[in-house]
Structures are given as structure tokens and as C-alpha cells.
């Protein structure tokens, strides 16, 4: 992941025993765990030492006896230092300011470890950080937000905590890409304001200036979440950008939509051409509400969807509604994407979808008796699509984790990654319409080298050595397999530590299965070791693409007719592959391993 020049290298390998307070910092301890850090000649950042499992402290800036800037919740280091986060003082460079820290004891190790700097190291080299998936430069990440394409650039915003690697301080982080594979971190352009933290939402390109902010303005919609002594409130707000998504201005008429419902969030907005109006989808409890507008500011409630539809094991979140072509026909259908937590098929969070019709005001599910899952792994959630995608494409991206254990996975300076980009279409299977999630074509352009093996037969067991070497745990495997009567077609990724991920195709049950119980580090959560299964279509031949990237495996079968995403944490890369056959034989007609650049 490329990073802006403002984030240069800064080493943070200090031992707690030898820490000395920076001379430009003077710490005063008060009663009731209040502390004042006086800063003389502020630089761009105050580097704050963090301990992930410590209680939160409140950190704010006081200038001229006035509270200014960010008021952040930071898990400052008490007994040990896990990593550092940058607290921006750029607005006060060269000036004297005071940092007010509440909720920290005077004996904490953080006081002598804080330091001022003009740079911050985001070239994080944790062994689990993926090479070709998007990750935050530092800090916590969950839902993708506000994604759009414009002028050759893909814009990805995301739920981001810039002050630690656990959930909190929700802002919109921002990354850009020209190829959907390599991403540049652009900072946090949408921060919390008086209406609360910035939760999930979407963006549109207002080509015709319907909102009055200017033709081509990026108009973003998000949920402002404000805690009060009487409970949390969620409301919908607007921020708009006239410089292509780099900086944003809050709309003075915020909030634009309110409700008495507690769960009222995640606005997805799109243009409905037949009706010449905008549509907003909102997640409200365990249903979706649909609104319409002519000007993006004033919204009319049109209908609700969700009663007795699909899975209801948890709260519905992050909606999307897209019109997709039916392969091999001139038909189109609407697909309503609905993320749910908990209630997934293998526990925790997951993404379901509905296929039907939409008249601009009401969505009708064409298959109301069946629950359909977009991905059959444990780690595919908050999936939404880019607006304004080129060539009529519908490109989706998901959060690659699960709320059951997202906060405790074994990474430090950052947490979570996004899936690879996926192009969505519909296909017929029997009398059903199903969603195809195909890896976006850009991933093929990232292929650097290829190692190939000629056709081979497996009647018992067959091991492949050295094929996965030299890829640093990040590669793509492409296979074409024909069953010659085998009941199970088994293939396993292994490393030298005895850790493995078992996968098999059960021809009798018509299932693809992945078992990560022995995949590496799993003890951080009892919900993590798991076996997941996806239904597959008919036929003796199938194709499979496995995207392995240090700490994740994404399996795409038959061009994305079935998909499974699971994260893994091996102590070293998987560098061997073993094939086995149960009751019969099978033929690997083609096998390529690609290094991805």
C-alpha cells in the first residue's frame, strides 16, 4: 500500500525502561486522573503510545483556554507499549498548546514515551499485513463507505479509528486507486462534528447539480451517531466535495433525516433514471426503508422491506440496491444487498441478498422462500458497491472480518483488510436467479510471474513442493479439475510448522468446504476455528481460483458462482500443496500459480 509523502519513516523501537520525556513536553498530573501535557513549539504530530487492552482516556487540545480540534478516546499505554498513533497538531505548528488528558493515572508509562515529530511511520511490516488487499495505513478499519469512481480513480472511504486498532473515534478514512489493487492512503477527510461520530454511508457524483452544490460535486451521505445520557441517536447527514473527494464541507442543513428508531443508519443513495429521482436505502432495525428525493436534501419515505424476508438473526446493516444483467439474456433484475450481524450461516456477521423488481419506490423479492448468501465464508461483511463505475460495471467490496473476533485478531498497528474487488452479475440455475461474484478483471493485470504444472491424475495422494515458494505468502492459484468418480476432491495448503488449511469438493453433497481449524494462530477466539461450506452446481468439472494473501484466503468457484472468504494467521507462509482423492480419482487439468505485484 503506497502512502503520501507526509507519512515518512519514523522508528518507534523504544524500550520502556529507557524512555525519557521529550524536552518540548512538560507533564502535570492533577487529581482524579486528569493530566496536562504542555507543548512548546508544536510539530505536526504528538506521537501517542497505545496499549490495546487499556481503558480509554480522553485526549483533547486546549489553545488560548479554549477546547479546539479533536477530542479523541485513546487507549494510552499504562503498563506496556503496543504501538504508536499520530495525534495531529499541524494546525498549531510552532505554537504553544496544551493537551488535556483525562482518565490516566500518573504512573502510566505513556507520559515519558510521548514525543513530537514531523513524521510518522506507516510502512508497517507486520507479518500478517496483506500485500495486494487494501488495509488501513494504521488504526482500526471496518465498513467500506462512500465508494465512487471518477476521472480514472477509484475512491474508497472506510470506517476508521486513527487513534487505535480497536473500534472507536469513527471517521471516514480515504484511500484511492487506479487499478483496484494498489491503494494510496489519503488521510481522514470526514471527521466527527457536533452531530456525532461519522458512521457508514455512500457517495454519488451529482453530475446535473440537483443539490445545488455545483455540477460534478461529490455528495456523501453518512450516519451521524451521537451518544447522549438518554441513549444513542442516529441521524443522516450530508458532506460534499468540490475537489474530487479530497476535502469535504458539511451541509449547513444537517441533519437531513431523523427518526425515533435507535438503529437508523448506513444510507445508500443512487439515481433512479426512469423516475428521474434519487433513492436512499436505510437500515432500520431488521428492515430496510426506502426514500426518494429530487434534490438530495429533502427525502420522502416510500416503502419498507424485510418483514418475513431472509435471515433475521441480528440487526440489518449496510444496504445496497443495484440493477444487474441476467447472463445470456437481455433481462435485468434488481438485487438488494443486506448485511446482517449476527445471523450469518456460520456464526457472526455475513451478507445476504434478495433478487427481484424495483419501481423506484418499492422493492419486491422474487424468491421470498429462500435465503441467499453472497459469500459462504466467515469473513465477508458490510459489502457495498462503487457508484458511478465505468462501462456499466457493478463492482463490490467487503470488509474481510467478523464481528465475533475482529477486535482481537493478532495484528497490532492496524486491524482488518478489504476483500478483493468483485464484479456482480446474475445467472440462472434451474428456476432460480443467483448472484455471481467474479474477481474484478484488474486482479489479472496484477499478475507478475506464473508457475505452471501440467495435467496430473490423483487416485490417492499427490504433493507439490516448491510451487508456492518465493511469493511471500501472497499469490493466486488457478485450477481446472475434473472428477473421475471421486467422492471427495481434497487439496490442502501447508507450511513447515504443520499448519494447514484443508479444502475439499464433495461431489455427492455438492459442496465446497474449507476448514481453518489448524490454520495457525486460532486461540484468540473460540469462534475463530471453523469449517465453512458452500453449495455448488451440477457437473463433474469445476474451476477454482484461490487468492492467498498472508492472512486471508478467498475461494472463487466456477467464475464466482460460489465464493468463500476466510482469514487465517499462519506462523509462516503456506508453501506446499497436497492433493488427495477419496473413493475414486480426479484429474487436475490445469494449475497455475501467479505472483501478484
Image (cartoon, rainbow, N blue to C red):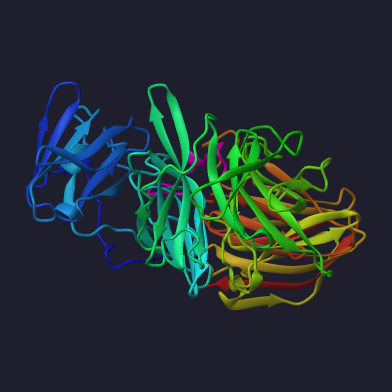
Where is 365 relative to 121, above or below? above
Residue in the image at 56% along x and 55% along y: 294
Query: Does residue 6 belong to the magenta stretch?
Result: no
Query: Mainly helix, strand or loop, the magenta region?
Result: loop
Pick the residue in front: 527 or 175: 175
Question: Could you tell me residue 462's position as x and y percent?
Answer: 76, 63
Question: Could you tell me residue 22's position as x and y percent?
Answer: 11, 47
Question: Could you tell me residue 64's position as x and y percent?
Answer: 9, 41
Residue 75 in view of the camera:
yes
Pick the residue in front: 267 or 480: 267
Where is 553 relative to 517, above or below? below
Pick the residue in front: 186 or 218: 218
| Residue 283 placement, left or right of 323 | left
Quarter of the view holding residue 56: top left
Residue in the image at 62% along x and 40% along y: 349
| Residue 59 placement, left or right of 283 | left
| Residue 586 placement, left or right of 517 | right
Over which residues does the magenta segment extend? 401-417
Question: Could you tell me residue 465's position as x and y percent?
Answer: 65, 67
Where is 348 relative to 205, above or below? above
Where is 500 relative to 206, above or below? above
Quarter of the rendering occupied by the N terminus: bottom left
**Number of callouts:** 0
Residue 499 in view of the camera:
no
Query: Does residue 405 belong to the magenta stretch?
Result: yes
Quarter of the view holding residue 431: bottom right
Residue in the image at 59% along x and 57% along y: 270
Quarter of the view holding residue 225: top left
Amino acid at each position: 500500500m503506497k502512502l503520501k509523502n507526509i507519512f515518512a519513516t519514523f522508528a518507534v523501537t523504544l524500550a520502556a525502561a529507557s524512555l525519557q520525556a521529550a524536552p518540548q513536553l512538560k507533564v502535570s498530573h492533577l487529581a482524579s486522573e486528569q493530566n496536562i501535557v504542555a507543548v512548546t513549539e508544536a510539530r505536526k504530530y504528538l506521537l501517542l503510545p497505545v496499549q490495546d487492552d487499556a481503558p480509554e482516556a480522553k485526549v483533547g487540545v486546549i489553545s488560548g483556554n479554549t477546547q479546539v480540534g479533536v477530542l479523541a478516546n485513546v487507549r494510552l499505554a499504562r503498563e506496556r507499549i503496543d504501538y504508536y498513533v499520530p495525534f495531529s497538531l499541524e494546525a498549531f505548528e510552532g505554537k504553544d498548546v496544551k493537551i488535556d488528558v483525562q482518565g490516566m493515572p500518573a504512573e502510566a508509562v505513556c507520559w515519558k514515551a510521548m514525543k513530537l515529530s514531523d513524521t510518522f511511520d506507516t510502512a508497517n511490516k507486520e507479518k500478517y499485513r496483506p500485500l495486494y488487499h487494501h488495509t488501513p495505513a494504521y488504526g482500526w478499519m471496518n465498513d467500506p463507505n462512500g465508494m465512487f469512481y471518477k476521472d480514472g480513480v477509484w475512491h474508497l472511504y472506510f470506517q476508521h479509528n486513527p487513534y487505535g486498532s480497536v473500534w472507536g473515534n469513527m471517521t471516514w478514512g480515504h484511500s484511492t486507486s487506479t487499478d483496484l489493487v494498489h491503494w494510496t492512503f489519503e488521510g481522514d477527510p470526514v471527521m466527527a462534528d457536533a452531530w456525532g461520530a461519522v458512521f457508514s454511508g455512500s457517495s454519488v457524483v451529482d453530475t446535473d447539480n440537483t443539490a445545488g452544490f455545483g455540477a460534478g460535486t461529490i455528495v456523501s451521505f453518512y450516519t451521524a451517531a451521537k451518544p447522549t445520557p438518554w441513549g444513542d441517536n442516529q441521524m443522516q447527514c450530508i458532506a460534499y466535495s468540490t475537489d474530487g473527494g479530497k476535502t469535504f464541507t458539511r451541509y449547513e442543513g444537517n441533519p437531513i433525516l431523523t427518526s425515533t428508531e435507535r438503529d437508523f443508519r448506513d444510507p445508500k443513495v443512487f439515481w433512479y433514471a426512469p423516475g428521474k429521482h434519487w433513492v436512499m436505502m436505510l437500515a432500520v432495525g431488521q428492515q430496510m426503508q426506502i426514500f426518494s428525493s429530487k434534490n438530495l436534501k429533502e427525502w420522502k419515505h416510500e416503502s419498507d422491506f424485510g418483514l418475513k424476508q431472509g435471515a433475521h438473526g441480528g440487526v440489518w446493516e449496510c444496504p445496497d440496491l443495484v440493477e444487474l444483467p441476467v447472463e445470456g439474456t437481455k433481462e435485468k433484475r434488481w438485487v438488494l444487498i443486506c448485511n446482517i450481524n449476527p445471523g450469518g450461516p456460520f456464526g457472526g456477521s455475513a451478507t445476504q441478498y434478495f433478487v427481484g423488481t424495483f419501481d423506484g419506490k418499492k422493492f419486491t423479492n422474487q424468491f421470498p422462500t429462500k435465503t441467499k448468501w453472497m459469500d459462504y465464508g466467515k469473513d465477508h461483511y458490510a459489502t457495498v458497491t462503487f457508484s458511478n463505475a465505468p462501462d456499466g460495471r457493478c463492482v463490490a467490496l467487503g470488509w474481510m472480518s467478523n464481528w465475533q473476533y475482529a477486535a482481537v485478531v493478532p495484528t497490532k498497528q492496524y486491524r482488518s483488510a478489504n476483500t478483493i474487488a468483485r464484479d456482480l452479475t446474475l445467472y440462472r440455475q434451474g428456476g432460480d436467479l443467483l448472484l455471481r461474484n467474479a474477481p474484478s478483471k484488474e486482479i489479472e493485470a496484477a499478475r507478475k510471474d506464473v508457475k505452471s504444472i501440467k495435467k496430473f491424475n490423483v487416485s490417492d495422494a499427490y504433493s507439490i513442493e516448491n510451487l508456492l515458494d518465493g511469493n511471500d505468502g501472497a499469490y493466486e492459484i488457478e485450477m481446472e479439475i475434473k472428477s473421475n468418480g471421486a467422492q471427495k476432491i481434497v487439496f490442502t495448503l501447508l507450511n513447515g510448522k504443520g499448519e494447514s488449511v484443508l479444502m475439499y469438493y464433495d461431489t455427492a453433497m455438492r459442496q465446497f468446504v474449507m476448514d481453518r481449524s489448524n490454520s495457525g494462530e486460532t486461540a484468540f477466539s473460540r469462534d475463530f476455528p471453523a469449517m465453512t461450506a458452500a453449495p455448488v452446481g451440477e457437473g463433474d468439472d469445476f474451476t477454482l481460483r484461490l487468492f492467498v494473501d498472508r492472512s486471508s484466503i478467498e475461494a472463487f468457484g466456477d467464475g464466482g458462482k460460489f465464493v468463500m472468504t476466510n482469514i487465517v494467521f499462519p506462523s509462516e507462509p503456506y508453501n506446499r500443496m497436497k492433493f488427495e482423492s477419496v473413493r475414486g480419482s480426479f484429474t487436475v487439468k490445469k494449475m497455475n500459480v501467479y505472483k501478484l505485484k
